[in-house]
Image (spheres, rainbow, N blue to C red):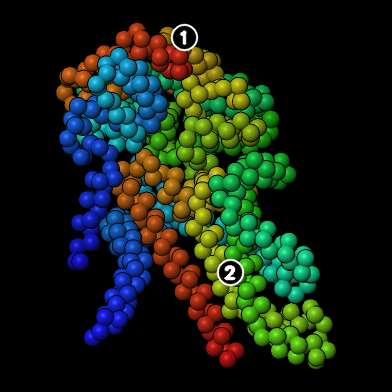
Amino acid sequence: MNRLERKDRLVRLALLVVAFSAVSILAVITVFMFEQGTPIIFKYGVKNFLAGSDWYPSEKSFGLWPMIVGSIYVTFGALVIGVPFGLACAIVLTEFASKRVRGLIKPVVELLAGIPSVVYGFMGVVILVPFIRETFGGPGLSVLAASIILGIMILPTIISISVDSIQALPPAYREGSVALGATKWQTVRMVLLPAARSGIIASIILGMGRAIGETMATIMIAGNAVSVPGSILAPVRTLTSNIALEMSYATGEHRQALFATGVILFIIIMILNTVANATSARRKKAKG
Amino acid sequence: MRHPFFIFPLILCVLGPPSCRGGRVQKDLIVAGSTSIQPFADKWAEVFMEKRPGLGINVQGGGSSAGIQACKSGACQIGMSSRELKKDEKDLTEIVIARDGLAIIVHPSNPVRGATLAQVKQIFSGDLTNWKFLGGPDKAITVVTREEGSGTRGAFQELVMGKIRIFRGAITEDSNGTVREIVAHDPHSVGFISLGLVNEQVRALALDGVEGSEASIVAGRYKLVRPFLFLTKGEPTGSAKEFIDFVLSDEGQALVKKEGLIPVK
């Protein structure tokens, strides 16, 4: 083995170590969280943890059901608001906008991604919450407020990935469709969107991940009540908010229950990702 | 590496509080616990360290329960608690260093001026849901509470609710400040905060006809009062005793009064 070969090997090894450090951090986090969180779940029963609706840690009652529902409501609400707007924006940017308009909108959207979540939360508290309270009634801190703010927060993710996937389509798709006499909108609806479907679904999955994991903004605008919300104007607590809100004082089993909350959140995200990946994979297969 | 976890205690010791590093730290007085008392303890420590150069006082938060635990285990010389000790915690020496009133606050535009403790209990248990029952407008009450584990919530639970739970639909915030902020902006809300933190943005309700004030608390007429406790393992000695004596002195208590708490003397 000559000197160059040895060097090559060394570099390869070093890169491998660095690459695996990311994976091992994930592994350490996972193991640590499960180690801390699962004992208490089994102590009080999986059913009580998942389906119980009373969260009173000081009385040893740890029901996460309202928070599980809360996380799902808020995430779903964010998608209802974020996906149509994001997709529309992506279509305009790729197909209808002039170069100048595109040059204006694209950087602005990217800037939106750089705004810290606490600023979104603050805007929500100062502008959106009073607006909802005065217009629709209720406390204002609500599922609706959280959904709107999170919907805005996931826009950049949805827009930029959708734009990339539409732009990556071969020009022949567009040209062929137009040559057949289709209008621009027909081309978008019947050719481009179906063709870019997997990328668009990926953008929605990533947006969903951002929405379900968002903590600071949700704590500020969702009201954090531990009950299954009866309407979109009712306050709600998500799993992430639960951990962040109570972490500072929690000791003993309360603390373990917060780790358990993290475990449940972890599992929910894994399930959502798997389902979403599976659907996009199946569609790809059916198409190909 | 079969045991990756052995790194954690190591990292904690390097990054963690100086208390686990040993060495010169022996001289430092460590005061830890309730985050409600922490800002006051910081003030006292600041003034006291000027008087006693060479003595370091390290004030840490963590919450009442953590402070009690730390005091028991010897991790700190003085623990701070803003709630009464439970039965199994009574083996520590308690020193009441100040008292703090709890105020039930509403929006300044709310015509309701007072309530009975029983009504407050019903509001927070979710049984009384409309201001019209208290002589106010026909509007639903927005209840704002603190998160589980908070000392202020613990004191409210003990002083007002007793065994009854605060109902699930209550909006939950994680500090006195945010509770006040929400009540200041929502005309139909009600919440509880430390009496010393009531300002012109909100109005405190009279309870059973008694306004919360230093006079009514000292006279024992205002019922929502919680003690701020310093805890030591056995009788306080050395620098811990000096610090506690300073806090209880006229100078220390004057500082308390300036910050809106009720002195013990």
Left-right relation of B191 to A129: left
Q: Which mark is residue A187?
A: none
Q: Dot 2: few (<14), some (14–19), or many (≥20) neighbours within 10 Å?
A: many
Quadrant into which the N terminus of chain B falls = bottom left
Q: Dot 1: few (<14), some (14–19), or many (≥20) neighbours within 10 Å?
A: few
- CB contact under 8 Å: marks 2 and 1: no
Q: How many marks?
A: 2
Of tags 2 and 1, the one toward the viewer is 2
Residue at image point 70% right, 85% down: A171
Residue at image point 29% right, 29% down: B58
**Callout 2: SS:** helix
Is residue A156 visible in the rendered image? The answer is yes
Q: Which mark is residue B215?
A: 1
Q: Is residue B5 above or below residue B95?
A: below
Judging depth in this view, the residue of A123 and B201 nearest the camera is: A123
Q: Residue furthest front?
A: A3
- Horizontal and vertical percent for residue A42? 29, 59
- Horizontal and vertical percent for residue A110? 63, 60
Q: Which mark is residue A204?
A: 2
Quadrant into which the C terminus of chain B falls = top left
Left-right relation of A105 to B226: right
Mark 2 and mark 1: Cα distance apart in space: 60 Å
The three-letter code of the residue at mark 1 reads Ala
Judging depth in this view, the residue of B218 and B263 nearest the camera is: B263
Q: Is residue A45 above or below residue A217?
A: below
Q: Chain of mark 1?
A: B
